[in-house]
Structures are given as structure tokens and as C-alpha cells.
Image (cartoon, rainbow, N blue to C red):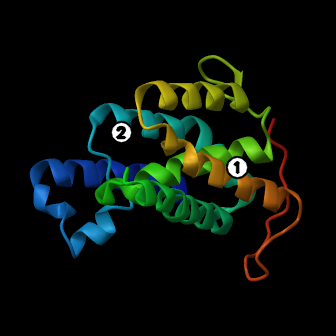
Amino acid sequence: MAFTEFLVGAYIVVFLLVMVFPAATAPPIGYVTSFFLVKDPFVLALYLFIMVFFIRKLEKKIGTNKFIVAYLLAGVVGNLGLFHIGAFEAETMLAKGGVMGLLGLLVALDPYAIVFEEIVPLPAIVVVIFLIVVKFLLENSLEVMPLLIGMLLGYLWKSGIEHPRLPSKPAQPWRR
């Protein structure tokens, strides 16, 4: 099972768990549920959509180890900035940042990767620019920080700067 499939299942299970047992966001179980918690059904649908149409392709490209590192780094580091300015929601910290960070990583590695092949083929950069505009108009504009962390991580990996303990997977072409 790919980590993307695990994430999709975890987001759904945690969403339903918190709907039935709201106390699931309190410590100690809250430390685990914060990795996958999205409180709004619309945002859950959006994240699941992003994971199915974008992120699955990214995991195949970079390998599961780097994928997990990117998810955790974007979730933690990207949201530290939100914590600093007071726009931080502890319960949804990692879920929000992790998905947006993976999107940023995808755009950094291949901005012209075709996504939504099954619906309307669009370059990833176009979709991410749309998401940034929507974030600035509808939500806290600093919520793009995890996206930028993912992009930075992608540019570092693309330019050959890697952690020596992470195994590298040979690059695979994006398109068939």
C-alpha cells in the first residue's frame, strides 16, 4: 500500500472519529489525530481530491521515504510560522500543512506536470496558483507558508542537496 493511500484512509477515519467522539482531539490521542484531522467536510473533500489527482503521482516520482519526510516537514515547519503569528490551530496543524507542502513539492519538481488527466489536463503550476489566490481571498493568507516550504524542499532536492541518510530513488518520467 502506498503512503498516499494510507493518508486518504487516515483522513477519512480521523474525520469520522472526531465527528463521533469530539474528545479525540484532546491529548494524548490528539497528538496522533492532528496528523490527519480536517474539521470541515469541504476541506476534507478538497484534500482527498488533491491527494488522488496530484499527490499519488508525486509519491511514485520521489519514493515513499522522501514523500513522508516532505509531508512531516511541511506540516511542522510550515505551521510554526502560523503559530508565531497566532493563526495556529493545534488540532489541524499537520494535516493542513502536510498536504499543501506536498503540492508545493510537486510544483517545485515539475511545474508543468499534467494533473487532472482524468478530467481537464492542466499544468500543476496553474492549479497551485489558483489555490494560492483562493487561500489569499478566503482564508488567512499565511496559510500558504506550508506550500512555500514544500516548494523550497523541492528546489533543494532538485538541485541535489539531500539528507545523506535518505535513500534516493532514480528519477522517473512524469508523463507516459
Q: Position of residue 51 (x, y in %)?
A: 52, 42
Q: Position of residue 3 (x, y in %)?
A: 53, 59
25 horizontally vs 51: left or right: left
Q: Which circle, 2 or 1, is nearer the viewer?
A: 1
Does residue 121 sit above or below 39 in this rendering? Answer: above
8 horizontally vs 146: left or right: left
Q: Mark 2 Cα within 10 Å, few/some/many (few <14, many 20+)?
A: many
Q: Is residue 116 visible?
A: no
Amino acid type at mark 1? Met
Q: Residue at point 23% right, 71% down? A: 29
Q: Can residue 99 be seen in this view?
A: yes
Q: Name the residue under label 1.
A: 151
Given the current orientation, which residue lies at the most extreme front position? 85
Compute the Cα span from label 2 to label 1.
Answer: 22 Å
Amino acid type at mark 2? Leu
Q: Name the residue under label 2.
A: 44
Q: Nearer the viewer, residue 144 or 125?
A: 144
